[in-house]
Amino acid sequence: MVDTAKKIALIKKIKPALHELYNPCRLCPLECGIYRENGEKGFCRSGSRIAVYSYSPHHGEEPPLSGNSGSGTIFFTHCNMKCVYCQNYAFSQESDFGETETESLAQKMLELSKMGCHNINLVSPTHYIRHIIDALELAYENSLDIPIVYNTSGYDTVNLISLMDGIVDIYLADMRYSRDEAGKSYSGVPGYASYNRKAIKEMFGQVGELKCDKNGIAEKGVIVRLLIMPCNTAGTLDSLRFLKDNVSSDIFLSIMSQYYPTYKAKEYPELARKINRSEYKEVLEEAEKLGFTNGWIQGLQTDADRFLGTNVKKGRFWWG
């Protein structure tokens, strides 16, 4: 059970600092400095009202998040990155769909809880975090008592993540690139790797290794998602080495093979195909070599077959 009284107290404490970051907007590393309340829009194109694309129980997240009843997933419109291969580009980059009020967002959270969802999973929350925190306060006041998942692209500042200490229970964070140049080339943002690595360390410092209840449902901790991309554009091997040397080899990983060339990806020769078996195997072998034993690995889906591989030494990886 979540200590709602403690969370409400923490929310009230951080709201002044959060509102200061919002106006002018410096919520993410881009620090656009625009006044959203005056109708100005920055890189992410978010306005003064929160925009929700969809909300529902999600059964395709990592096993401790989805469980049997689903993860209470809320997809927000817009994003503070512009990935040329984004699978959700229709609402993350090309739509203003779903503007709503804070009270409505709080109600959606409560509905998901009543459906039996194991958590509230906030997908791409950074650019709307001020509104989300206001909604969470209302939801907690109306008996919301399930964990909060901060499901982020990982392009976050330590300043903002530090404000989430004690409010966010589970960080589900991407480590998309290991080089700043790749973030600029493929997602249009400067300094991705530099900001991302600092943010991941802050997240792990707050909640640590993933902890689950007796039924295997996540209660607290960090899961790092690593999307394998063709031609090593993501630099996944370097990200694994960073985690080993600077965070912990006990951190839970979600190694993902689902990349496919959608949206504008085919304009970039190095991104214009799925990953191959050699690229997939290289990442798995490096994870094993470095001693990572917690997490999940997606099977490799090729045009011909589905390759599942073999368990790593300690057998604590699950195959998705």
Image: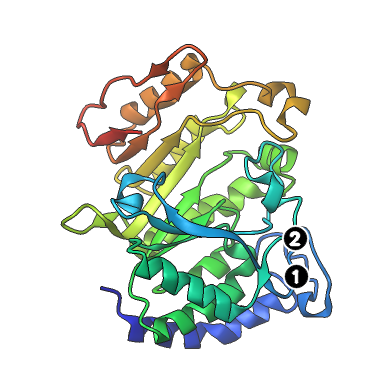
Q: Is residue 274 left or right of residue 191?
A: left
Residue 47 marker: 1
Name the residue located 32 percent from the left edge and 55 percent from the top edge. Answer: 69
Q: Nearer the viewer, mark 1 or mark 2?
A: 2
Residue 31 marker: none
Q: Secondary structure at mark 2?
A: loop
Name the residue located 26 percent from the left edge and 55 percent from the top edge. Answer: 217
Q: Say which amino acid is labelled 2.
A: Asp
Which is nearer the eye, 313 or 129?
A: 129
Vertical comparison of 111 with 213: above or below: below
Vertical comparison of 215 with 206: above or below: above
The disc, 1 or 2, on the residue closer to the chain's N-terminal end is: 1
Q: Say which amino acid is labelled 1.
A: Gly
The answer to whether any part of residue 202 appears in the image is no
Vertical comparison of 38 with 177: above or below: below
Name the residue located 32 percent from the left edge and 45 percent from the top edge. Answer: 63
Q: Distance of mark 1 from mark 2, alpha carbons? A: 9 Å
The total number of labels drawn is 2
Quarter of the image for residue 309 reads: top left
Which is nearer the eye, 138 or 97?
A: 97
Query: Which image quadrant: the C terminus?
Result: top left
Q: Is residue 263 left or right of residue 121?
A: right
Query: Which image quadrant: the N terminus?
Result: bottom left
Q: Residue furthest top?
A: 304
Q: Point out residue 152 in the picture as x, y percentages from the top left corner.
A: 53, 55
Vertical comparison of 13 with 198: above or below: below
- Are the two marked residues, 1 and 2, in contact with CB atoms closer than 8 angstroms? yes
Q: Point out residue 274 in the picture as x, y percentages from the top left corner.
A: 58, 22
The answer to whether any part of residue 126 appears in the image is yes
Name the residue located 40 percent from the left edge and 40 percent from the top edge. Answer: 254
Location of mark 2 (residue): 96
Q: Secondary structure at mark 1?
A: loop
